[in-house]
Image (cartoon, rainbow, N blue to C red):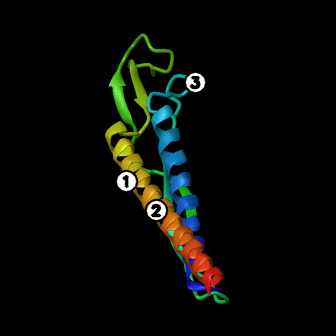
Amino acid sequence: MDPLSLSVNVAASGLNAQSQRLRIASENIANAQSTGNTPGSDPYQRKTITFASAVDAASGGSFVQVQSIDLDMSGFRVEYEPGHQAADENGFVKLPNVNALVEMADMSEANRSYEANLQVIKQARELISMTIDLMRST
């Protein structure tokens, strides 16, 4: 595989990984206030994503892939809301362990990484096109 095509494939793996990262952060934000359905039950638990590097023996390229999507085991927030449907006998409600600021920062970083990978693909396509044009003119 030629280096330009390889760079497109590597960047495409980065696009896929970052889009999954954006999806996980979006799920976390969407469920930031989701409590359990019954008193004392656990609310939504924040998800985390882990990446790994995978080397393709045939091409020699190092690709990024999602290694796992796990649950964040940190403790839930607890607030006193005695009238809430999910409040326990003492009036406390367990809330998700999602921090919207952390999720927004993660989304911003994933967005920048996505854009960088997209720029690599655009640049490689332009170089491939220039090479084809150069070969035609000779």
Q: Is mark 3 on a helix, strand or loop?
A: loop
Report the residue marked by disc 3: 37
Report the residue marked by disc 1: 109
- Image location (x, y in percent) of residue 22: 50, 48
**Residue at (54, 60) in percent of width and height:** 15
**Residue at (52, 63) in percent of width and height:** 122
Q: Which residue reaches farthest front?
A: 137
**Residue at (61, 82) in percent of width and height:** 137
Q: Residue 19 carries which label?
A: none
The N terminus: image quadrant: bottom right
Q: Which one is in front, 120 or 105?
A: 120
Residue 27 vertical position relative to residue 116 in the rendered view, above or below: above
Q: Distance between the residues labelled 3 and 1?
A: 33 Å
Q: Distance between the residues labelled 1 and 2?
A: 15 Å
Q: Which one is in front, 79 or 50?
A: 50
Q: Distance between the residues labelled 2 and 3?
A: 45 Å
Residue 57's quadrant in the figure?
bottom right
**Residue at (50, 32) in percent of width and height:** 30
Q: Nearer the viewer, mark 1 or mark 2?
A: 2
- Image location (x, y in percent) of residue 115: 44, 56
Residue 49 visible within the image:
yes
Q: Earlier in the sequence, mark 2 or mark 3?
A: 3
- Image location (x, y in percent) of residue 77: 36, 34
Q: Residues within 10 Å of mark 2 (few under 14, many from 20)?
A: few
> Which amino acid type corresponds to the residue marked 3 in the rendered image?
Asn
Q: Which of marks 2 and 3 is in front?
A: 2
> Which amino acid type corresponds to the residue marked 2 in the rendered image?
Gln
Q: Residues within 10 Å of mark 1 (few under 14, many from 20)?
A: some
Q: Is mark 1 on a helix, strand or loop?
A: helix
Residue 65 visible within the image:
no
Q: Which mark is residue 119?
A: 2
Q: Earlier in the sequence, mark 1 or mark 2?
A: 1
